[in-house]
Every structure is written in C-alpha cells, then in structure tokens.
Image (tube, rainbow, N blue to C red):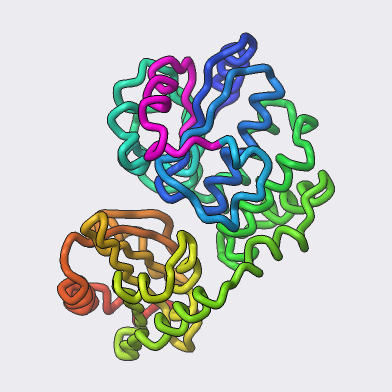
Amino acid sequence: MEKDQYESLKKELSTTKKIIIVPHKSPDGDAVGSITALYGYLKKKNHEVSMISPNDFPSFLQWMKHSDEILNYEMNRDQSDDLIAAADLIFILDHNAFHRAGDMETPLSKADATFVMIDHHQQPDDFATYMYSDTGMSSTCEMVYHFIENMGELDSIDENMASSLYTGILTDTGSFKYRSTTSTTLRVAADLVDLGADSEGINRKIYDVNTPTRMKLLGVALNNMVILAKHRTAYITLTQKELDDNNFQKGDTEGFVNYALSLDNIVFAQIFIEKADEGIIKTSLRSKGNFDVNTMARENWNGGGHKNAAGGRSDESMKDTVDKLISILPRYEDDLQSTQI
C-alpha cells in the first residue's frame, strides 16, 4: 500500500468499527499467526473484532493467544454470516481470492464491507480497497509486522502478538531455510524475540508434536514414496484408508512432502492425500531452486501459491491423479534438468 492508503485506513480505524478477519481454508501457522496478531492489534484500538476461519486448524497451533476465539465457519455458519453481513471492514489475510476461503466465498462476495488484503501469494484478485500484496515477503506474518510498522504503531506489539507473528514467519520460511528468508525477515524475527517471542519454546510447540500414530503414518508415507530420478522428482501418496488406519488428525501430514524434497538431486516433490469426504485428492507441491511449482499448480492442479511451495487438488481417482503427474512431467523437463541446487 502507498502512504496515502495507510493514511486513509488510519482515518477509517480512528473510530470504532465492526471488523472481521478471515484466513484461508485449512489455516496453517502463517494464517493463524497473522490473524491472531492482527486481532490483538485491532482490539487494542477498541474495535469490535471477530476472526472467522473457513474450517478447523491443527491442534499444535491452538496455543496462540486468542486462537480459542476463532470461529469455525463450518460449525457456526449462521453466526458467521451475520457477522460478515454487518461488518464495516473485512481483513483478508494469507490469501488473495475469495474461493480460497472455501464455503465463505459466497457471504464474502456479497458483503458490503470495505476489504483490506494482506497477502504474499501471486496473482491477487481485485476485490480489496486496501491491498498490501508482496510476493517477495517470507510470510503474511512478516507483512502484518510491516503493516503495523507503517501504521506507526510498532510499540503496540506485545509478547502475545510477537509470538504469533514469529510462529508464522518460522513456519512459512521452513525454520528460516527457504529462499524467501531475507535479511529483513531475520531482523523482524530478531525484533519479535526482543518483544517477547520465545524462539525455543515456539519451535518446540510447533515441531515437537509427534504422536505414535503420526509417526506410523509418516512411515506409511515414506514407504509409498516413489522416486522418478530421470525427472528429478519424487512423490508420495496417502489414501483415505491409510489415513483412517493410522487415526489421522488434522495437521498430521504437515511437512511430509519435504522428506521427498530432501532427497539428493531431487528438485520437485509432490504429495497426494485422498479426502473422501470432499471427493478430491489434496496435493502439495515443493521445489528447490528456480523450478516454479506455482505455475505447475495453476496449470494442472486447480491451485497455486509460491514459486517453491504451492497447493491444489485433483477431482480424479488416486491412480488417475498419479498418472496425470507422470504424463505432464515431460512438459517441465527442461526446467527440471536445468535447475541448480
């Protein structure tokens, strides 16, 4: 956003407003971290604020301050619709298109509120009056930090907000190892630690969460992994039966695809997870170097994301979905082979 937009938004926020904050469907650490931090900031300005998530989020993120106040749209549809319809301002965080909010797409598209978007994904839809979009940012949490900074209110960030923001930066940078981690990202993270974020404690809460069933499910995933060395590609499949047999809980498969990507000379990895209740195969794509999985996800998997991390879905069977992957790889062969790692 330009300076005049910040000034205009400041004026809008100078009086009490009814505000809704919305993350994307199946919120991750960056989504939950950004909405809870922004919630804390706006509550300090005496606004009436509600957070509404399209669906539930993993238990290992539920320690963050205010996370227990997030409404689950699937469980509170009527209440949520009423709040959206009455809102003066709606903040869209960590996504840039209404369809990324699942079943909330319809009430959001009908809302009379002023929209504020803060997001770092590519190709945003044009719906927001105030649009802070930067694909070069490591995370939406880093952007929320800069948003508050540009509002001239960094001193409003307390320990709880700092912890939420640090969590999103940590998770969306893969613990600061992805190329989106800039020197500015590290300076912001350091400032958040100075403001009270417990880096060691947050790491433990996010990553030391294995259960016996999750470890067994990881074993199944690794056993299912297929390496296509010719294409510098590896993929993993998990069927609904395999999930059920291992007592799958939301968030259990987080990071599984990175095991495939960690293999020597592999530059592209993909995981396919069957969601029988939705009738789809959910997929996550990861890459190294300059191989662009955002483009691949948009062209083939009804999705998108970032250059090195994207997601999508398939409406076909698991077999047909895997066959599709194998069939499209030759189209990307030049990029796969030329990628430097």
Residue nearest the viewer, comparing 78 with 202 = 78
What is the number of callouts on the image? 0
Indicate left or right for 316 with 310 as reference: left
Residue visible at 56% across and 57% down in the picture: 172
Instruction: Please tell me whether residue 71 belongs to the stretch shown in magenta.
Output: yes
Taking the magenta stretch, the answer to whether it contains residue 143 is: no
Residue under the point 44% across and 80% down: 260
| Furthest residue in direction top, as rendered | 15
Residue 67 image point, x, y percent: 60, 42
Residue at 50% across / 69% down in the picture?
255
Image: 233 above or below 57: below
Is residue 192 among the parts visible in the rendering? yes
* Horizontal and vertical percent position of residue 187: 75, 52
Span colored in magenta = 70-92
Say left or right for 244 vs 152: left
Frontmost residue, 157 versus 339: 157
On screen, 164 above or below 282? above
Residue 340 in view here: no
Q: x and y percent of residue 42 in the render?
A: 64, 25
Q: Is residue 240 above or below residue 161?
A: below
Residue 194 placement (x, y as % from top left) = 84, 48
**Is residue 189 rendered to the left or right of residue 8?**
right
Q: Going 52% across and 32% down the picture, which residue do you hit?
A: 51
